[in-house]
């Protein structure tokens, strides 16, 4: 598969994110002395997760990789989100729902609105727009778990010949997205609150479905079923994930330590798991798998 330029940038920014989180994690273990057994924290299951992640790793190798990742030139604007993950991890040792953990899609939508404008999400959007050729032909697009930034972004890139429908479970995200769409007068863009895991009904057939940084918060099968039905099994599905756990298994433990602080997080998807789901649905499809992007072309069922 030929790597798009933007896709390479996406990989670099995600490597930076992982490297930066690894360094933060290292200092966290020093500060909390979590790797010394017998230190009790009120939220013992989160403390245990840390001990499992760091107990047996080769720290020197881990830090060498981390330094290499953070020293490359790339879009490092994810630092703000990473710092919030880091800060939240201390509070999570006290209580899993500590009020200073500010990572909820409903409660903290205003913060997510800032983070979603930055890397890696902003770069993922550029890759997806390029893959779908937005702005060239008219296209009907549905974005599952659209968040607050994507509707206005894709809406303006695709232009008034297209149709964009965003769906998100968080009413706060939907409200922010709607105000941006209104301010930019993007009449061909609509956003509604709904759950991508329940059966979605639509008035039209879509050409393409976007699933960007969603599948770690949902079961995979119902979302894929919706993607298939919304395109009448004759369209494309673009999936972006910060991590496909079968592609980069070495990143999973540290990414889980931090993403588990986001309410609703389950686990990062695996490409093999997504393909197994499609097979079990009896769908005909072709796919192209990159490191963080999976493109599925439906061709009936
Ligand atoms: C990390 S954000 C990604 C937003 C957007 N796709 C982007 O790339 O900028 C994840 C979004 O998925 C939404 N979400 C989580 N679970 C969902 C579900 N079951 N149905 C619809 N949206 C969901 C959240 O509210 C949040 O806005």
Image (spheres, helix red, strand yellow):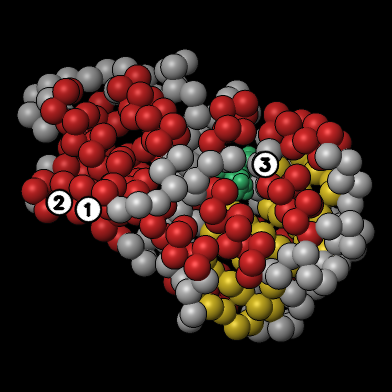
Q: Do the residues labelled 2 and 1 touch (CB within 8 Å)?
A: yes
Mark 3, other Cα within 10 Å: few <14 / some 14–19 / many ≥20: many
Q: Quadrant of ligand 1?
A: top right
C-alpha gap between disc 2 and disc 1: 6 Å
Residue at which label 3 appears? 149
Tag of residue 77? none
Determine whether the residue tagged by mark 2 lies in a helix, strand or loop.
Answer: helix
Image position of 237 with respect to 219: above or below: below
In the rendered image, residue 48, in percent from the top left (x then y), is placed at: 22, 34
Is residue 294 at all visible to an observer of this figure? yes
Location of residue 93 (image quadrant)? top left
C-alpha gap between disc 3 and disc 2: 35 Å
Residue at which label 2 appears? 64
Q: Quadrant of the C terminus?
A: bottom right
Q: Is residue 231 left or right of residue 98?
A: right
Determine whether the residue tagged by mark 3 lies in a helix, strand or loop.
Answer: loop
In the rendered image, residue 141, in percent from the top left (x then y), is placed at: 78, 61
Tag of residue 68? 1
Image position of 88 with respect to 210: above or below: above
Pointer 1 or 3: first along the chain: 1
Q: How many labels does the image show?
A: 3
The answer to whether mark 3 is within 8 Å of ligand 1 is: yes
Mark 1, other Cα within 10 Å: few <14 / some 14–19 / many ≥20: few
- Residue at point 41% right, 43% down? 76
C-alpha gap between disc 1 and disc 3: 31 Å
């Amino acid at each position: 598969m030929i790597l798009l330029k933007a896709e390479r940038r996406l990989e670099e920014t995600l490597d930076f994110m992982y490297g930066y989180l690894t360094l933060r994690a290292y200092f966290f273990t020093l500060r909390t002395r979590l790797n010394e057994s017998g230190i009790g924290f009120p939220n013992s299951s989160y403390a245990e997760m840390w001990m499992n992640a760091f107990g047996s790793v080769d720290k020197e190798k881990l830090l060498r990789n981390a330094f290499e990742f953070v020293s490359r030139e790339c879009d490092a604007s994810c630092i703000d989100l990473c710092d919030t993950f880091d800060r939240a991890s201390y509070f999570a040792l006290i209580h899993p729902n500590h009020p200073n953990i500010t990572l909820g899609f409903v409660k903290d939508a205003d913060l997510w609105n800032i983070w979603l404008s930055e890397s890696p999400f902003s770069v993922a959007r550029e890759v997806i727009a390029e893959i779908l050729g937005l702005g060239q032909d008219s296209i009907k697009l549905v974005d599952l778990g659209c968040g607050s930034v994507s509707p206005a972004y894709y809406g303006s890139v695709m232009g008034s010949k297209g149709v964009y429908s965003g769906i998100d479970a968080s009413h706060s995200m939907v409200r922010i997205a709607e105000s941006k769409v209104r301010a930019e007068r993007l009449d061909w863009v609509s956003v509604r609150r709904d759950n991508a895991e329940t059966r979605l009904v639509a008035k039209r057939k879509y050409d393409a479905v976007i699933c960007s940084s969603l599948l770690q918060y949902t079961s995979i099968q119902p979302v894929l079923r919706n993607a298939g039905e919304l395109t009448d099994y004759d369209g494309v599905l673009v999936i972006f994930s910060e991590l496909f756990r079968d592609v980069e298994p070495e990143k999973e433990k540290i990414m889980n330590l931090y993403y588990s602080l986001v309410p609703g997080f389950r686990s990062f998807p695996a490409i093999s798991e997504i393909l197994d789901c499609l097979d079990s649905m009896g769908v005909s499809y072709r796919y192209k798998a990159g490191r963080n992007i999976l493109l599925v072309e439906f061709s009936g069922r």
